[in-house]
Image: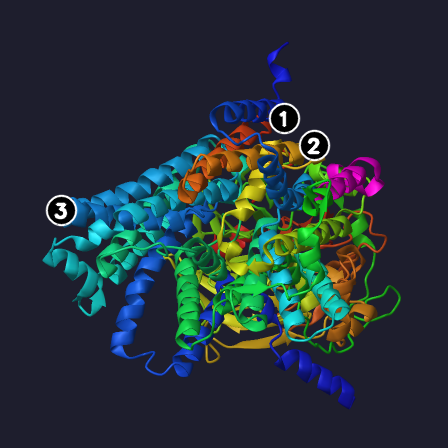
Amino acid sequence: MTLRERLHAWRYNLVPDHIIGEILEKKWTDSAIPFVVLVATVVGFGTAIPGFFSPYSLQESTRQLGEFSLVVIGMTVVMLGGGIDLAVGAIFALSAFAAIATFFIFAMPVWVACLAAVGTGVLIGAINGFLIGYIRLRAFLTTLVTLIIGRAIFEILIVNYAGKAQMSQVYSDLWDFIGDDTILGASVPVWTALIIAVVAHIALTRSRIGWHILAVGGSRRSAHNAGIQVRKMVFLTYVFSGFTSGLAGFLFATRLSGAGIGTGHGLEILALTAAVVGGNSLGGGRGSIVKGLMGAIIVLVMTNGLIRLGYGTGTNQMVLGVLLAAAVTIDIRWLKNRHKVLNEMYVAPVYLNMVDAPSAEAGSGTKYELNSKLSQARSIGLGEVEGPEDVILDRNDNLYCGTRHGEVVRFFAPDYTDWEVFAHVGGFPLGLAFDKDENLISCVGAMGLYSITPDRKVTRLTAETRRSLTSIVDDAVLRDPNDLDIAPDGKIYFTDSTKRYDAHDWTLDSIENRGTGRLLVYNPEDGSTKTLLDGYHYTNGVTIAHDKKSLLFCETWTCRIHRYWLEGPKKGKAEILIDDLPGYPDNINRASDGTYWMAWLGMRTPSFDLSLRHPDFRKRMTRRLPQDEWLFANVNNGGVVKFDDRGKILMTLGDLEGKSHPSVTSMREHKGQLFIGGILNNRIGVFDIEGADKTWTAPVDYWGEK
Amino acid sequence: MNLSTFNQERIVLIATVLVVIFAAIVLPGFLNVTNLISIVRSISVLGILALGMAIVIIGRGIDLSMVAIMAMSIAWYLQMLHTGYGETEALMLVLLAVVFIGAVNGFLVAYADVPPIFVTLATGLFVFGFVRSQLIPSDAVTVPAGHWLEAVGAARFAGIPVDVFVFLTLAFATFLFLRFTKWGRYVYYAGDNPAAARNIGIPVRPMLVLRYILSALFSFIAGLLTAASLLSIQTRVINSNLLYDVILVAVIGGIGLSGGKGGVRNVLIGAALIGILLNVMTIANISLLLQNLIKSTILLAAIILDGWLNPRDEQTAQQGDI
């Protein structure tokens, strides 16, 4: 190995590039930028302003923050529903005035003032909701106009009645308590905002009405077609926004006991900026209350901070303008390109040096030398089955296989011309095995481990294992359960080929070649699933050895067969049985004479082996070329191999012309015949084995006579 | 005569005539020449802004930064003159800045796909904030003594202030542009159905940038005229309802907010109605606050009517088009 190659190996095997793709797949990355901005803002202004974190200063700031957060929560809900509410500035001011007028001028109790404020808010919200939801006007302009109308009314009212309110002698302990005091160290606005935030969060994420609102925001037309009352939902979001802004106005009124021309001026811009800066998407459907709250803190700390640092008129607007433009642009570009970036970034190939294997070419004279014997195989279900990855026979000689349509198909003995759908499971049923009670257990690609009883009842056995501590994408889920076998004690040993790709993307895994395959065991007694081995390059076929003391499993992309000990001194340990095969091994099954059959999915090629030593090449390939021009592992030529317990190769079968079985993924011996399946094939093959025991069947041999 | 002949343009025209007749009878002094000239003059700045807005709206956009650009560009221009910049130097710098802001608006809308409402709201805020905090020391900046703007403000042709002629010239130029030039027609196609316009090979995105640059330039001209007539520029105009008056003129004249509809004639009619209405209210001694309320209520009615006459096309309206 040259130094250059060694450096390459280190670069691509030690630097965890794949983490970037996995992190990008996480939803919380949406909040990452706002969160960083939040921390930077608070820390920045906290250090720049002396006394920023002093209790008194915090108390005053949080009081204001509570009110502002309420407004932002309302704005967030409206935005999630696909709208926008600029009228909050007017609602806030009018509600504050309503509270003040009720309390100071009409000398009503505090709760009536609160009701008046909230009622004002709800009323204006309802008007907005009616115009936008039911008459379907444009949200931005409509609320802009109601904002102007509201402000005009407010200014007229303030000019005429502000003096009267100030002269009032009305006094109430409750009013002052709400405006000045604290409960458990936090002020009333903070508590109110917290409660409303929690309620709104739960409603949005866990209630029917919240889901409907998000659905309308996500896609109005689809929501309508799904039977959601789109107009009503839009209406309700504005009513809610009016409610929270009204509440905020009331709290403002109790804090200042007065209102002026400037009350709530520009609040709509602040709230809008906060909601967007927090990471809520314009146009709806994506976002959360928490994002709104993050944005509220960022904007309030920034604007108050700039004032306290003594920057002149206009600075605030300048900063807000930049913040708003940047947030909206980033949001839209992110939304548009995240998927693209993810697609490009996700495949992160690693270095692998495959040792040269003996040739399998015809005429090479090696033990692996392939022939064309499989082309003599007779076909079953030609053109009727699609993708029989695994095949299996029961005690009555009936033949079963999975198909890519998510069905398990049964061909009837003795001639296998009639067939039926035995059970519909979904996913892609891959590995099959019968247990002692003749339940058919299947590894279903993209779904998990399933059991089908003789009377066709489908139950899920397991779909997850324990999550590993360092995982970023949840690896508890079984993404690609591939093959299984059942130990005499009933434990089901099975493989999950990769954590990085879904079952149908197995070819991508060959390009990346990262070892993330697992061997797992399911215990039917307590229903638990345990990971036994991890970090193999695409674990695939599994079979219990003839002596039942170990199991054999293969690792496809490195072309190896491993033995895993179930008992004895090496219990729980794995060792390599056969190394450096010239083909990619798939399923393994027991043969009648105490040996094993193994399928070759495809044969190794020098070009792909070379590319495995050049991860940079594969990386460039996945980023710059369309997928149909990529270099994949060869699956055009495969075969069947027979080997014994010591790993000695006894025989090979191939179909060099590729007429009927170019790629083989499974085979079962049954009464002297070999049944052959292929995940990309349109048939099952039957091949007569010379000199094989014509009475031997796998169920009888393994589980005994019934 | 069936109902469909009552389109918005005619309704507004009839309303304008009715208001004029009503005012002529009830309000003494409405019909005298000085008042009429003052009406025309008052609507020329509004009209120029509305022309810029109309070009943008027809292309299915909106420009909320117009008033900020108008006030702040002129304020900075006058400030530069006060601090000793040469006339051409200052003018070039301001023009460059105006074109730049228009281009930023257009770029973000066209190439970053950000909704125009947010882009222009943000740039409007930024322009005001930046100029006010970094470039000028106070809210109002005066026109230096002996500057050519004084002459423009005082100039009269046939007794009519020069603003009016500027407005009419710009209106005629806009009319020629929209009606008789290829790019002018493209504005309608792009506003009517941007995706289809793009498919037939119209340079939709460069044209969007062009439209926002045009509206910024119109704002600058409106600013020059404002400064010429008042001999100073007050940056607090940002906080006034001028921007909404501009939208009001465009919408009430019958330029559909969903794009592709309307023309210069609609701006003229809208400006006439609003100008006369404002004048009537002022003569009738209605307070400014109440005027705001009345204007905004009319705007709401206009938007409801617009929504009714030009319902949003669910097929071509984008998701998130708010």
- Residue A586, placed above or below residue B245: below
Q: Which residue is located at x 82 percent, y 71 percent? A: A606
Mark 2 belongs to which amino acid?
Answer: Arg
Q: Look at the image and give the residue range highlighted in magenta.
A: B167-188
Give residue A107's mark: 3
Mark 3 belongs to which amino acid?
Answer: Ala
Residue placed farthest to the right in the image? A363
Q: Which residue is located at x 79 percent, y 88 percent? A: A2
Q: Are marks 1 and 2 on the same chain?
A: yes
Residue B81, horizontal then vertical, whole percent:
67, 70
Tell me which chain the residue with mark 3 is part of. Answer: A
- Mark 3 or mark 2, whichever is nearer to me: 2
Q: Is residue B305 visible?
A: yes
Q: Nearer the viewer, residue B216 or A29?
A: B216
The residue carrying pointer 2 sits among few (fewer than 14), some (14 to 19) or many (20 or more) residues within 10 Å by Cα, namely some
Q: CA distance from mark 3 to mark 2?
A: 55 Å
Q: CA distance from mark 1 to mark 2?
A: 9 Å
- Identify the element where label 1 is drawn: helix
Q: Are marks 1 and 2 in contact (CB under 8 Å)?
A: yes
A70 lies left or right of A278:
left
Residue A541, horizontal then vertical, whole percent:
60, 61
The residue carrying pointer 1 sits among few (fewer than 14), some (14 to 19) or many (20 or more) residues within 10 Å by Cα, namely some
Label 2: which residue? B265
Q: Quadrant of residue B73?
A: bottom right
- Identify the element where label 2 is drawn: helix
Mark 1 belongs to which amino acid?
Answer: Glu
The residue carrying pointer 3 sits among few (fewer than 14), some (14 to 19) or many (20 or more) residues within 10 Å by Cα, namely some
Label 1: which residue? B9
Q: Is residue A355 magenta?
A: no
